[in-house]
Amino acid sequence: MKSIFVAIIAISAPLGAQWLNYPTPGVPKAANGKPNLSAPAPKTADGKPDFSGMWQAFRGVMNTNRPCPTGECDELRDTDHWLNYGAGMPGGLPYQPWAAAKLKQREADLGKDDPTSYCLPLGTPRDLVAPGFKKIVHTPGLMVLMNERNASFRQIFIDGRPLPEDPQPSWSGYSTAKWEGDTLVVQTNGLRDDMWLDRSGSPLTDAAKVTERFRRPNYGHLEIEVSIDDPKAYTKPWTATKITENIRLNTEMLDDNCVEGERDMKHMVGK
Amino acid sequence: MNRRFRAIAIAAALTASLSAAQWLKYPTSGVPKTPSGLPNLGAPAPRTSDGKVDFSGMWEADNRPCPPGGCNDMPLSAQFLDIGAGLPGELPYQPWAAEVVKQRTAIAGQGDHESHCLPSGVPRMLWHPTFRRIVQFPDLLLFLNERNLSYRQVFTDGRPLPADPQPSWNGYSTGRWEGDTLVVETNGLRDGLWLDRKGDPLTGAAKVTERFRRPNYGNLEVDVTIDDPNAYTKPWTATVQQFIVLNTELLAYFCNENERDVAHFVGK
């Protein structure tokens, strides 16, 4: 917030628009009037944990815990999982030999072929760890995960429908979910064959089954455990270190349309 | 749905070895039925638990029947081509706007932002030929578009429009109820939006009002009023229809995936 304020002062003549600061309703408050982030998670009318809110992935402690300069960061920080979904896993991800070779090649050419660099979709489950804001809304039958990037969304069906047997491969795949106590267990199939899970280029193939376990331990945090079962790319199923998302209050989603004014692609030539 | 299903079925038969994926056909729940078991599209509109008309559902802007043998593409509504279609006379263009529309027609609309995979923007997304889903919450009306899997939010929690919003493709939208009509107002749109393929302009001065009604189960009607003194000499209103889509799901359409067209947009 502070950095935005500074930015607005610095360029107030060309761009004087108002920051979106409409207060989030229903925020539990501590005795001193500040948001009480460790208050219990809200519940929906049917007694399930309510994941609704604006969220941002915690940027992590592995590679990117660079402190902000005085007065806050001037850009959104990459999260650990954004850089490599195996962040914090002893030995890293269990790549198949071809996948390990691919990773090396992608590192050598500076990840120039990352689909997200070409304004293509994040895909599942990379949409959980992109550095921008997310918003979750849900009805009893449907959870929608919105992402500031390209003002995009993913649907997660909670109405008891089965996963399709032979889905059309796509970036988001097809996601259904069921409750296990206070955990929403989301399963996804139907992903396309050439996805990048992270900036390192860890592959995800059309053989992948992705399981995401969503919990909201308190008002201020969402925890997601992502498991990947993709025998084409990995020697065994694996579970990423826990992804934590922080609540974001008193603002709104701003759209980031990657294609707009795009000038980078022609410079992505590797080394 | 039938139309698209037929078209897909034909395409699948032609390319069965390449792409044999299953069509998404999970049945829509809660569809009112006629005695013969068909969807009763003229049944009353559903209501939410707080008694409001419920706009939730999947919708399309045109549902003309296919020729025998199926459609090979989504039909373009007359309003997608020209939002003034059906209105008496021309839109009340300011002189510069009339000139711009003439130029855009002359160069075959090569500068249309939709053709360059940029967002449709508000309110044009309503008449884009791909499907959209509306999800209605007590405090939010959410639009989920197949095109670029992109969303639009309309806040119905009583908040005011921002006084000085950041200009954007979707602007900032709030809605309030007038009886069974949801009145949605939008400001904060960017300069340079096209309302249709013809190139009718919309500028950063625009206030857009959409009045949503659901007269029955199968139909939505939206009166779209454009008040944009930069581009038009007076406010004007077009009425846009939306038709329910049943027993399928949104499919993703990413405009810039394998994009090969932009290089050929050279006008006439």
Image: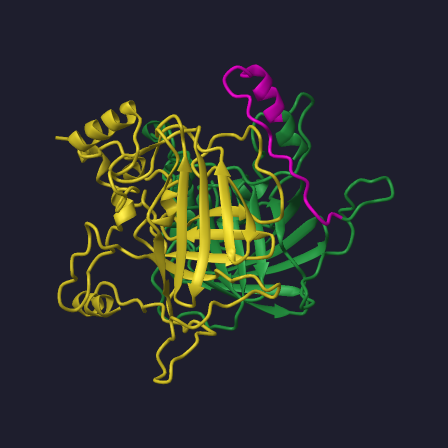
- Residue A93, compared with residue A222, is above or below; it is above
Q: Can residue A233 be seen in this view?
A: yes
Residue B157: horizontal and vertical position, in percent?
52, 70
- Which residue extends farthest bottom? A31
Rendered position, A79 above or below A47? above
Q: Which chain is green?
A: B
Looking at this view, is A264 or A162 the one in front? A162
Q: In the drawing, does residue A146 fall left or right of residue B33?
A: left
Residue range of the region highlighted in magenta in the rendering: B7-31
Residue B60 coordinates in the image, percent (x, y): 60, 43
Q: Position of residue A74 (x, y in %)?
A: 19, 60
Quarter assignment of residue A16: bottom left
Q: Quadrant of the N terminus of chain B?
A: top right
Dominant SS of magenta comes to loop
**Residue extending farthest right:** B35
The residue under the point 22% across, 40% down is A263
Above or below for A4 versus A201: below
Q: Which chain is yellow?
A: A
Name above or below for residue A2 compared with residue B93. below
**Residue B83 appears anywhere in the view:** no
Q: Residue at x 23, y 54 (%)?
A: A77
Q: Which quarter shows the C terminus of chain B?
A: top left
